[in-house]
Amino acid sequence: MKVEFVSAPTSRLIASLVDQDALPSGLEQVLADAARASRFSGKPGQVFEGFADRGGRLIRVALAGLGEKNSKARLASLEKAGAGLVAKYLTSGEATLAIDFASSGLTASEAATVLLGARLRGWRHDAYRTKLSEDQKPSLTTIEAVGAPAGADVAWAAEAALATGVEFTRELVTEPANIIYPDSFVARCQARFAGTGLELTVLDEAEMRALGMGALLGVSQGSPRAPAILAIRWNGEAAGAKPTAFVGKGVTFDTGGISIKPAGGMEDMKWDMGGAGAVAGTMLALALRGAKANVVGVCGLVENMPDGNAQRPGDVVTSMSGQTIEVINTDAEGRLVLCDVLTWVQKVHAPARIVDLATLTGAMMIALGQEYAGVFANDDALADGLLAAGLASGDKLWRMPLAPEYDKLIDSPIADIKNVGPRFGGSITAAQFIQRFIDKGTPWAHLDIAGMVWADKPGTTWDKGATGYGVRLLDRYVRDNLEG
């Protein structure tokens, strides 16, 4: 969706932004009466519609609620206002929505927040829908920011970059597994990142085998599709400064392998690469807005399938770190991918800190539902920075425990470690497993985002489907902690 900054609207659909219990003073009396009669009070996300004759022209007038002016949730309310307008008018037959900022009293950054909510809510993936009726097709293509405060266009440029990153993540997560698999994930990133200044490195199966990545390769060996590791580097800081590493689990389809999943709902496992998708979208956003930080994003890409060559429960594999792993359950594959990728990242990039993202455990969804992702960390400062970024961005996190007492639950009788523990504490033992592959002294956080990358019902800034979770979180962390 395109955003244009104009001094006067060209659209017949004009929206005013309304603080709670404060209808615009210049609003036609009939519209003000109608708004009150419909119980419109300007609460966050509320939208009222009416029609008025202005200068002999019939105008479609919308009022969008901003909520209480001094609310602690003000930024979230601003997003809801923009998103609520687009949700209402996306398929309305209108091509352009004019949002009047002239009398809103919003700052430049606040205006950009309204526009961000609007653009994010307007994203849809209709590539494979061939029989939509005209009234089901999106018509809204342009938002006119009318009378925006000075500097709003500059503030919007950074938010537009962020929106592009979120949209790219949603695209990757939405595509079916016959379209996005390790090689095509890499190819799509290569095409999308061209000209951005991002530096890409790709490791193929032979290179991974030479490096001793037995854990990752064990996951992929049941699929005819070759695995890949994609490293995306952004150098926005002084040369020589250690990068921050974002690492994503990229299981492009997860059947569970020999420990096969139930058939019902297995189609959802196309989004088991949501961590890698979030990393790719974050790197695009950072590059497009010229982030003043050194960051490397690494995606471990595999497909987990159950053919005659697939890894078996009980197999023992040797990871790149040299640690041996007894594979108790082939459906606990994400940690096997991550452990080798994390070892490679530390050896090659020597990062100052690491954040990994993975749709890792169903246990995380049992614990936190679809409202928060879990964060496990060996460093309080890193955890606190991520928690704050989650609150600021809306990609919320809840801190979960790590403790030596859990380690004994994943000790193997025949190898250094086993890939699953008992039924209870499944998300914790998964994080404990990953922690064993983090070098001493390296700040690290593991984000289990299993409940967050896909939504079965619309949210504030997304429709049903891929949410783009993680991009806003990581971008906000970079802004607040890595950039001066």
Image (spheres, grey):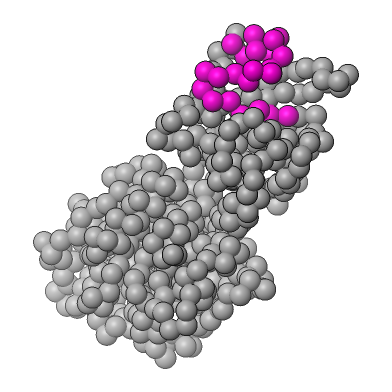
The residue at 54%/71% (across/down) is 182
**Residue 9's spot in the image, x, y percent?**
78, 35
Residue at (70, 52) in percent of width and height? 127
361 within the magenta span: no
Residue 15 sits inside the magenta stretch: yes
The correct choice, above or below, for 285 with respect to 6 in the image is below
Left or right position of 45 against 305: right
Q: Residue furthest right?
A: 56
- Can residue 172 be seen at all in this image of the molecule? no
Q: How many marks?
A: 0
In this orientation, which residue lies closer to the viewer: 24 or 361?
A: 24
The residue drawn where x is 27% and y is 52% is 399
Asked if residue 368 is positioned above or below residue 287 in the image, the reply reads above
Q: Which portion, as a residue range, is magenta?
A: 14-36
Residue sitting nearer the eye, 338 or 382: 382
Which residue occupies the foreground of this view, 322 or 65? 65
**Where is residue 85 shown, x and y percent of the image?**
63, 32
Quarter of the image with the C terminus in it: bottom left
- Determine whether 49 is above or below 9 in the image: above
Residue 311 coordinates in the image, percent (x, y): 37, 73
Viewer-closest of 439 and 306: 439
Q: Residue 404, how many percent across, how many down? A: 13, 64
